Amino acid sequence: MISALSFRPAVVIESSKIAALANAAYRGETSRQGWTTEADLLDGLRTRAEEVQRLIESDHSVILLCMHGNEIVGSVCLERHADAAHVGMFVVNPTLQSHGVGKQLLTYAESYAHRHWAVQKFLMHVITQRHELIEFYERRGYRRTGVFKSFPVNPEMWQPKLSGLQLEELQKLI
C-alpha cells in the first residue's frame, strides 16, 4: 500500500499530463507493466489533451487526481447525470498498480461525488473481455447490470484488435 497520497480536482494546465497517463495506462507497451492493460484489445490512444480539457472545463464533470508528492499517479473522471455519477477514464500509473492506489482513488471519487452532487448511484462501462477489471469493481460493490452496448467506433483514436467488443454497464447504489 502506498501511503501519503493526496487527491484534488485537476486544472486545465494538467490536461496533457492526464492524457499521457491515461494513454500509458490503457494502451501500448507501457500499459503491460500493470494489470489493467487494454493493449491486447485495442491499438491507438485512449484520449487526447483536448478531451481532458473539455471534461475539466465542463460544469457537469470533474477529473480528480491522485498525487504522490508532486507526481500525478492516478486520475478518474466523474460525470454527473441526474442522480448518478458516471465513473470513467479511471487510471493508475502502471508501475504503481497492485499497491492500493486505485482502491484509494475510487473511494475518494465516490465520496467526492456523494458530497458535491448528492448522487444515489455510480455507473461505469467496462469492456466485457476485461474479466479481472470487472472482478475488481465487483469487490468494491459494483454489480453487473446486464446492459450492454457496442464498443464505440473511433478509427482516428483507436483500432480494435478483436471484433465484437462490447461494454457492460456496472452500477453501485449508495
Image (cartoon, rainbow, N blue to C red):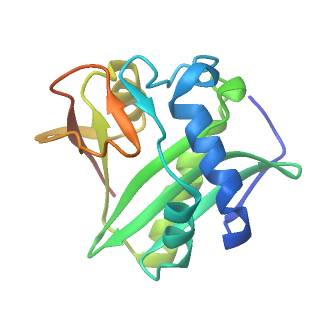
- The answer to whether 92 appears left or right of 157 in the picture is right
Location of the N terminus by quadrant is top right
User: Which image quarter is the C terminus in?
Assistant: bottom left
Hey, which residue is sitting farthest front in the picture?
156
- Coordinates of residue 129 in the picture (x, y in percent): 27, 21
Residue 51, compared with residue 142, is above or below; it is below
Q: Nearer the viewer, residue 13 or 62?
A: 13
Give the image quarter of residue 145.
top left
Specify whether 149 is left or right of 160.
left
Q: Nearer the viewer, residue 3 or 29?
A: 29
Residue 140 lies, with reference to residue 131, above or below; the image says below
Q: Vertically, is 139 above or below 87?
A: above
Q: Position of residue 80 (x, y in %)?
A: 37, 71
Picture coordinates of residue 63 (x, y %)? Answer: 56, 63
For image coordinates 64% across by 52% down, the residue present is: 18
Q: Which residue is most to the bottom?
A: 59
Left or right for 110, reference 147: right
Q: Is residue 38 left or right of residue 4?
A: left
